[in-house]
Image (cartoon, rainbow, N blue to C red):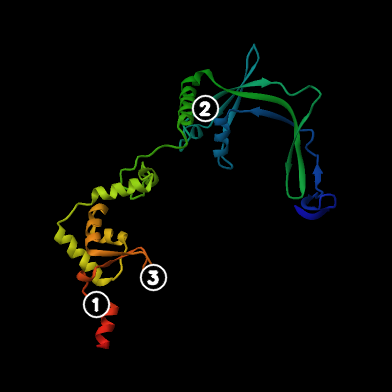
Amino acid sequence: HYFKRINLRMSGIYVEQPEIKEKHVYTDRAGKNLWLVKVPKYVSDRLKMCEEGAQFGVIKTNRTAVGTKISLDISQSLCDRTGEGITACPSSHDMRLGTLAGPNRALAVYSEGEDVIQMEGVVKTRFDVYQNQNSSRSYLSLKKFEVERKAVPERTIKFNTKTINAFRPSTVSQKQLYTTKAQKEEKLAAKRIRLDRSVVEGMILKAFKKNQYISQKNLMNITSQPEAYLKEFLSEMCVYNNKAPHKNTWELKPEYRHYESSSASKDMETD
């Protein structure tokens, strides 16, 4: 198809609209009478599987005193063909005469080419294809296969036997475990065990050799002692600073210091 751009002034939208191309219509076969044959889905599938030029089946007519009986026998090679989602189907079928939409309505059949439309004829007769009574067993097995195939879910659950390293969510979050700061401190204090006094004093002196001013929180992390137990050593060995520049920190008392104060060193220099 050839396309041209049309500007819709009312909406301001550009729309691609196919350009109608003229084709010649040939009606030399308009007087040809055709059959409209309604077939089951499995027959339609076999018709699609039939190769070009191969025989699909045979239509037989049998005239009796009651009337004319028409049957369709599909090629046995097509009926026995199986595959994914396909099973064997019955080959013998009956063709029953049906009715069209209305007596005054005509149903024409056209075939379209690149530049030509060909009228193939007009439908005059309709037939409905049904499975033959003699092939009831094969038809029942076919329907059973179709029902079982439709009952299989599209999505299935597969169990994985291999171990997968993945992060799994915890049942209790950190916020729920420690609702308040006090509870968190109680949890940490419960894990701290009181050591011997000489051991704790050695850790405190060793820490103050590295830093002159240390906060209480850092001392608790260094010694891993309960807060109440650590305060006993701080009140005995240290002095608390309330003024800047080392506010809210602890410093060793003069008798525990391994260094001399700045004022004492100045006096020694003057002497």
Residue under label 3: 245
In the foreground, 238 or 162? 238
Marks 2 and 3 close (CB-CB < 8 Å): no
Decide which of tag 2 and tag 3 comes sooner along the chain. Answer: 2
Q: Is residue 70 above or below residue 170?
A: above
Counting residues from the N terminus, which is met first, the one under dot 1 or under dot 2?
Answer: 2
Amino acid carrying mark 3 in the image: Pro
Residue beneath disc 2: 91
Check disc 1 and give the amino acid type.
Answer: Glu
- State the CA–CA distance, disc 2 to disc 3: 103 Å
Secondary structure beneath label 1: loop
Give percent across and percent down for residue 232: 22, 56
Residue 47 image position (x, y, % from top left): 57, 35
- Mark 1–mark 3 distance (CA, rounded to whole Å): 19 Å
Q: Residues within 10 Å of mark 3 (few under 14, many from 20)?
A: few
Q: Which of label 2 and label 3 is nearer to you?
A: 3
Between marks 1 and 2 in the image, the one whose residue lies nearer the viewer: 1
- The structure residue drawn at horizontal position 75% and vertical position 34%, both measured from the top left corner, is 121
User: Quarter of the image containing the C terminus?
Assistant: bottom left
Give the farthest residue toward the right.
9
Residue at 72% from the left image edge and 41% from the top image edge: 111
Taking depth in this image into account, of 261 and 90 the one nearest to the observer is 261
The residue that disc 1 covers is 260
Instruction: Please tell me the numbered disc located at residue 237.
Output: none
